[in-house]
Amino acid sequence: MNFFDAIKICFIKYTNFSDRASRSEFWLFYLFTSIINLILLVVNPDPYASVSMIFTLATVIPSTAVLARRLHDINRSGWWYLIALTVIGIIPLIYWFCKKGNQGENQFGDQPLA
């Protein structure tokens, strides 16, 4: 999956919290949002600038959806993201985001890149 396909898929499936997302889809979308946020920060250092806030609000639902789908790919519920509320919970989340997805079908659907 290339960079632009990952972005397109994430925006097409922006309300889909039930399928699976591959590692490349998750990380490329995360890279996209990080690059745009960095550019907006350089252009206007005020984090509450209207363009920056509009972009953040426009990507919060697609980001959460791809995050839940990524957890589904390793056969975990999307609700596991709530362990990020504990500081130590970020460590297993990063590990799970980097982990290879389950082969074949699991309870959340077919393999995303099959």
Image: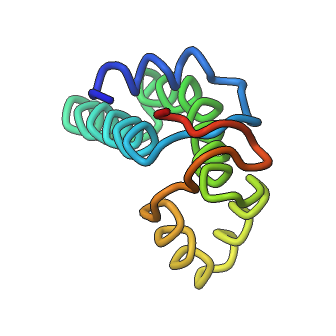
Q: Is residue 49 left or right of residue 62?
A: left
User: Which of the 4 image quadrants contains residue 92?
Assistant: bottom right
Q: Is residue 82 left or right of residue 71?
A: right
Look at the picture and state if 66 lies above or below 94: above
User: Which of the 4 image quadrants contains residue 98?
Assistant: bottom left
State the image coordinates of residue 94 (x, y, percent, origin top left). 47, 68
State the image coordinates of residue 44 (x, y, percent, origin top left). 27, 32
Foreground residue, 111 or 44? 111
Q: Quadrant of the N terminus?
A: top left
Residue at left offset 57%, top offset 14%: 12
State the image coordinates of residue 68 (x, y, percent, origin top left). 67, 46
Residue at left offset 28%, top offset 28%: 3
Q: Which residue is farthest front? A: 104
Foreground residue, 39 or 50? 39
Foreground residue, 9 or 100? 100
State the image coordinates of residue 18 (x, y, percent, origin top left). 76, 36
Q: How is the image coloured?
A: rainbow
